[in-house]
Amino acid sequence: MYSKNVAIESIDKGVSRLGNTWYKDKKQAYGVTVIDTTSKQDARAADWASRQVGKPYNINYLNVDQRDSFYCSQLVWAAFLDTASIDLNTKDNGKMIHPMELVEGPKTRTIYKMRP
C-alpha cells in the first residue's frame, strides 16, 4: 500500500498505481510490516516502488536481481533491499520470492488479514 487509497502493484500489465479495491477484488489479502524499519524507511520503500510504475511485469521469477521489470513480491522485496538493505527473501524458494515469504518471513509481521 502506498497510501490509504492507493496501492502500487505489479500485475500482468506491469507496475501500476491502482485504487485500493482489494476488499472487492481479492479473496484474501494480508497487511504486513517489516519489523525493524522506521516509518521513514517504510516511506522510502513505498516511494521507490512508486517510481517503478510503468515498468513491465517480470515473468522470469528466478531473475530477481533485475530492476527493469518486476513481479508482485519481487517489487516489495526490491523496495526494502534497495532502500533499507533489508533482504526479505527467506531462500525457501531459492532466488524466487514467493508472496507468502513476505507474510510468514522472520523479518515481517502481519498487521491485517482479510477473509482468513
Image (spheres, rainbow, N blue to C red):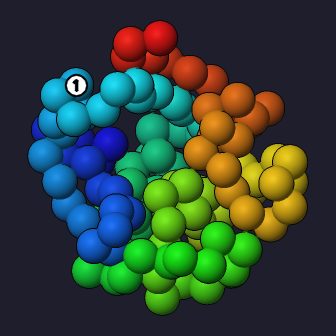
Picture layout, residue 58 above or below residue 87:
below
**Residue 83 as seen in the image, left or right of residue 3:** right
Location of the N terminus (image quadrant): top left
Residue indicated by mark 1: 23
Does any portion of residue 61 appear in the rendered image? yes
Picture layout, residue 86 above or below residue 52:
above
- Outermost residue toward the top in this view: 116
Location of residue 60 (image quadrant)? bottom right
Does any portion of residue 15 appear in the rendered image? no
x 86%, y 48%: residue: 92
Secondary structure beneath disc 1? Answer: helix
Q: Position of residue 86 (x, y in %)?
A: 71, 54
x 52%, y 30%: residue: 32
Picture layout, residue 48 above or below residue 109:
below
Pick the residue in front: 3 or 105. Answer: 105
Pick the residue in front: 57 or 105. Answer: 57
Query: How many residues crowd mark 1 within 10 Å: few (<14), some (14–19), many (20+)?
Result: few
Amino acid type indicated by mark 1: Tyr
Location of residue 18 (image quadrant)? bottom left
Q: Position of residue 20 (x, y in %)?
A: 18, 39
Location of residue 73 (image quadrant)? bottom right
x 44%, y 16%: residue: 113
**Residue 88 as seen in the image, left or right of residue 70:** right
x 47%, y 58%: residue: 72
Q: Position of residue 76 (x, y in %)?
A: 52, 55
**Residue 1 as seen in the image, left or right of residue 34:** left
